Amino acid sequence: MEQQNKLGTMPMPQLVLNMSLPLMISLLVQSLYNIVDSIFVARLGEEALTAVSLAYPIQLLMIAVSVGTSVGVNALLSRSLGAKEYETTGKAATSGLLLAFAGTLIFLLLGVFCAGWFVRMFTSDAVIGAYCRQYLTICMIFCAGTFIGTMYQRFLQSTGDTFDSMLSLVSGAVTNLVLDPLLIFGLLGLPALGIRGAAIATVIGQWVAGAVAVILNKKHNPLVRVQLRGFHPDGKIFAQIYKVGFPTILTQAMGSIMLSAVNAILISYSATAVAFFGVYYKLQSFLFMPMNGMGQAAIPIAGYNLGAGKRERVLGLLKTMLPAAVVLSLLISVIFFAVPGPLLRIFSASDDMLALGVPALRIICGTFAFASVTMILGYTVSGLGNGVVNMLGTALRQCILLVPCIWIFSRQFGVGYAWYAFWVSEVLATLYAVWATVRELRRKGILS
């Protein structure tokens, strides 16, 4: 109960730091899954790195479904705990676990029957296609760790326990870090499995993270309990979960859609352009994790205080988080602008990739402050029970505006100018997010 109460009583700057810091650390470590895969896979050759870049949108789609559903559960749990509606809490947790099982089954079947079809959509190169299919099939068939682990991590976060959630994610990432070189290159007497080894290391890490999350919930989270015995599905609970969850799934899926669409544009120029964009996206995702951590912390804080009728604390949350996110994003921009070459060389970048990527990173990094504002506002409004603002803000910055602008700029001026599309999409998305957030705060009686 003490963990739960801090959401409504702890001073906001202290609460934001207390909630955000473990999430920042855990998300930074978790993002190493794909970063580490790419670093080691790059040593197998640029074809292997391109294959992992082509597979990444499907991995993002799995993450979108698992995170989106669990965010919907998290928002409902936080509001029900704030309002002390504990029967709803139990139903929401049980419904969330069943939805995690359903997501696992769907992607397992897609991995068995559709992985080859997806690969053929984006490349006719036999070597790249074989690498991509091997990697993708393993990640999809054994995706249970992703779905179950993500759900149980959100159970912890809904009560304010971001530290145990961090432990779960770190355990999986460390497992992946250790296994990657062993399984890819056949160290310590193990067989050299190449790109299959990278996929196997990833899924084992996800299973370890999931198992740790389940154990920590059982030991440390008495407020959120799954109750399968006597459970009857409740349409109202599912509707409340997906009122936030479905827009969040679409929001998270934007990254997958954007990567697939941009890859389709860039492959007409060169495989190097595709490999670079995959590397950029993973670098950006890794360095953006502090903002993501703050954003995810905003969901239970906003939801709990709305449920408890403490609306002034929601405003305090925004006043604390927005300046912090902008400062962090500016620091990240400085890193991208100052050392783009060394960042790309981490992935064994060729001379061609450096020639393309160094100016591209310097163009894109100027938009990071706008992206941070859009993200924080979207997550906060999701915590209030409205996932549409986050969905549309992300859609504008990653799909609706970005993809057409990349296509137009690259066709009219050359691929070196495609990256200015980020300036158009990020600035307009931020203007939308500010307007929509003010409207939602007025609807909830938080702003007059």
Image: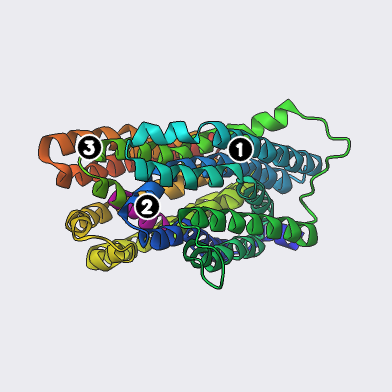
Residue drawn at x 26%, y 32% is 404
Q: Position of residue 397 (x, y in %)?
A: 34, 40
Left or right: where does residue 325 sit relative to residue 125? right
Compute the Cα span from label 1 to label 3. 31 Å
Against 436, is 364 above or below? below
Majority secondary structure in the magenta region: helix
Residue reaching furthest to the top? 235
Sequence-first tag of 1 and 3: 1
Residue at 54% in and 61% down: 20
- Depth check: 263 or 323 in front? 263
Tell me the colour scheme of the image: rainbow
Q: Position of residue 218 (x, y in %)?
A: 79, 57
Against 295, residue 25 (above or below) is: below
Q: Amino acid at mark 1?
A: Leu
**In terms of secondary structure, where does tag 3 sit?**
loop
Q: CA distance from mark 1 to mark 2?
A: 23 Å
Instruction: Kindly tell me whether residue 28 is visible in this rendering.
Output: yes
* Residue drawn at point x = 54 percent, y = 56 percent: 202
- Residue 16: horizontal and vertical position, in percent? 54, 61
265 left or right of 446? Answer: left
Q: Is residue 3 magenta?
A: no
Mark 1 or mark 2, which has the lower sequence index?
A: 2
Residue under label 2, please give it.
48
Q: Which residues are magenta?
A: 276-286
Compared across the picture, whether 266 is left or right of 142 comes to left
Name the residue carrying label 3: 268
Q: Residue furthest left?
A: 413
Secondary element at image label 2:
helix
Element assignment for label 1 = helix
Disc number placed over residue 108 in the picture, else none: 1
Residue 400 or residue 34, whichever sits in front = 34
